[in-house]
Amino acid sequence: MKIILAFGVLTLFVACNANDLSQNIVRSPKNYFPEEKTKVLVVGTFHFDYPGLDAHQIDEQDKIDVLKEPKRSEVTELVEYIKLFRPTKIAIEATPEWKATDRLRKYQEGDYRDQRDERYQLGMRIANDLKLDTLYSIDASSMAKDIEKLDSTYSNQLWNDFDFQSNDPYEDYVNTWLEAADQQAKQMNLLAYFKQINSRESHQLGYGIYLIGDFKLDNYRGADILSYWWYNRNVRIFRKLQLITESNDDKILLIFGNGHAAVLRQLIECSPEYEFIEFDSLLSIS
């Protein structure tokens, strides 16, 4: 009788522990990390002042003027929408040498109001409206520049023929898409356009277009260039985001070219520290 009881107790003990173990196995991985996370809103944008530094060049007739109607009023609508996020910090695509906070001070005094650059039209305007006293510059150069300084001969050989002029048939699809987007920026309401270009689908394809064309140079050369040039730059930007994050109570607005936004989305969504806020969700969370 005692032996049966002993085995019965032992069996019950094992069953209970097996049940606990089973519950641990089926728990979602995210349950092992803090529920509270720093919220980040990434606003991917085209460059309002068209500096012409990107591989894709916009035809003159497709450019818009954000200082003239109707786009002037549409920028105001876009600003008011982004402010629903109520950011505690704003970071922009600028290096420390740009002295963003110094420029913000002058903006608050009335300067720079005629500048088309989105860093003024969105970043400084929102910071001014929300009475924020700092504007963070978190752009970064890539490892490619470091390697070029160390060994320019190797760097030049690596970059040979990497010029976005590939005969990959997918380049035609990309160009058709980008040209259509140029037309949409001109024809659509800006807020509606920003919701479209900041969608998950748009960001995934925006990241994916770097994985065709010159990415296929030789066995690994194109992949190596992308890794130490474009992806590395965005990983460094993400690291700068971490450096300005002080607590889970932070709500950080990032304003960057949409090519960056596509990679930053991936990094932020995968990080256990941050919650990526979908651009088109602001009305529901405000």
Image: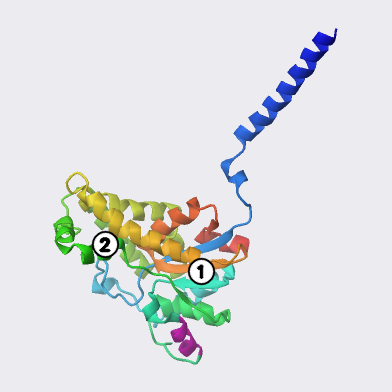
Q: Earlier in the sequence, mark 2 or mark 1?
A: 2
Q: Is residue 30 above or below residue 97?
A: above
Q: Which mark is residue 244?
A: 1
Per the rendered image, the range of residues in magenta is 101-108
Q: Residue at x 30, y 62 (%)?
A: 143
Q: Main secondary structure of the magenta part?
A: helix
User: How far across and down, in percent of the image, does residue 57 sit?
Assistant: 24, 67
> Closer to the camera, 196 or 94?
94
User: How far across and down, in percent of the image, does residue 222 sit?
Assistant: 22, 51
Q: Residue at x 53, y 82 (%)?
A: 128
Regarding residue 193, the answer to whether it shows in the image is: no
User: How far across and down, in percent of the image, does residue 231 sit?
Assistant: 34, 57
Regarding residue 219, the answer to whether it shows in the image is: yes
Amino acid carrying label 2: it is: Ala
Amino acid carrying label 1: it is: Ile
Whether 256 is among the magenta residues is no
Q: Is residue 50 left or right of residue 273?
A: left
Q: Indicate the secondary structure of the residue bearing disc 1.
A: helix
User: How far across and down, in percent of the image, does residue 189 sit?
Assistant: 44, 69
Q: Residue at x 62, y 44 (%)?
A: 31
Quadrant position of residue 158: bottom left
Residue farthest to the top, as pictured: 1
Residue identifier under label 2: 144
Quadrant position of residue 50: bottom left
Q: Is residue 271 left or right of residue 193?
A: right
Q: Which mark is residue 72?
A: none
